[in-house]
Image (cartoon, helix red, strand yellow):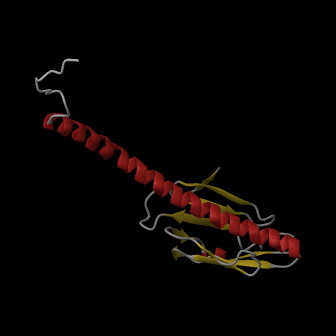
Amino acid sequence: MLLSAAPNHDRGFTLIEILIVLFIAGILMAIGIPSFLASLNNKKVDNAIARVESALQESQREAIKKSKTCTVTIPTGVAPQLTSNCSASGDLSIEAVNISRPSSLATLTFDFKGRVNPGNQGTILISLPDGSRPQKCLAISSGIGLIRTGNYDGSNCNTL
């Protein structure tokens, strides 16, 4: 077997090739990071609305199951904590979002049939703490206690 004594110059990458690859990767990251952050914000708001809805539905189910009146206190502001006198899972803390609601929904009351008191109807708005999009809403109807979620367009709750 003959071994060549000539040096092999075809190994590795040149500095120009590495810089080009880094430049292309930087451009792709600059395009992708805002989309990734928007996706994270959407997930935060979606998770928060699902948690509030499940807490209300749990209290409604417990009111029916135990045949008693159940109340849920819904505070406003950033990172609120929902409390209920019937919740089996205890108080619910909602992180990284802002909740706003009409004063009629400060305390939501379900009767022994799971119905909402006539004065307890309205829309709960859940958004990021800085008030930016996305904004989701949870509409509560009086009477049968129907709870619906949707997207908030600035003036209306467009339920899904």
Query: Closest to the observer: 58 or 113?
Result: 58
Relative to 126, residue 159 above or below: above
Whole-percent x, y for residue 21 in the image: 24, 37
Query: Closest to the observer: 90 or 80?
Result: 90
Q: Residue furthest left?
A: 6
Relative to 85, residue 138 above or below: above
Tell me which corner region of the image, top left, top right, bottom left or bottom right, holds residue 106. bottom right
Whole-percent x, y for residue 153 in the image: 52, 54
Tell me which corner region of the image, top left, top right, bottom left or bottom right, holds residue 125. bottom right
Q: Is residue 115 visible?
A: no
- Residue at 58 percent across and 60 percent down: it is 47
The quadrant the N terminus occupies is top left
Direction from residue 116 to residue 149 in the image, left or right: left
Whole-percent x, y for residue 27 in the image: 27, 41
Whole-percent x, y for residue 63 in the image: 83, 74
Tell me which corner region of the image, top left, top right, bottom left or bottom right, holds residue 115. bottom right
Direction from residue 88 to residue 92 in the image, left or right: left
Relative to 86, residue 45 above or below: above
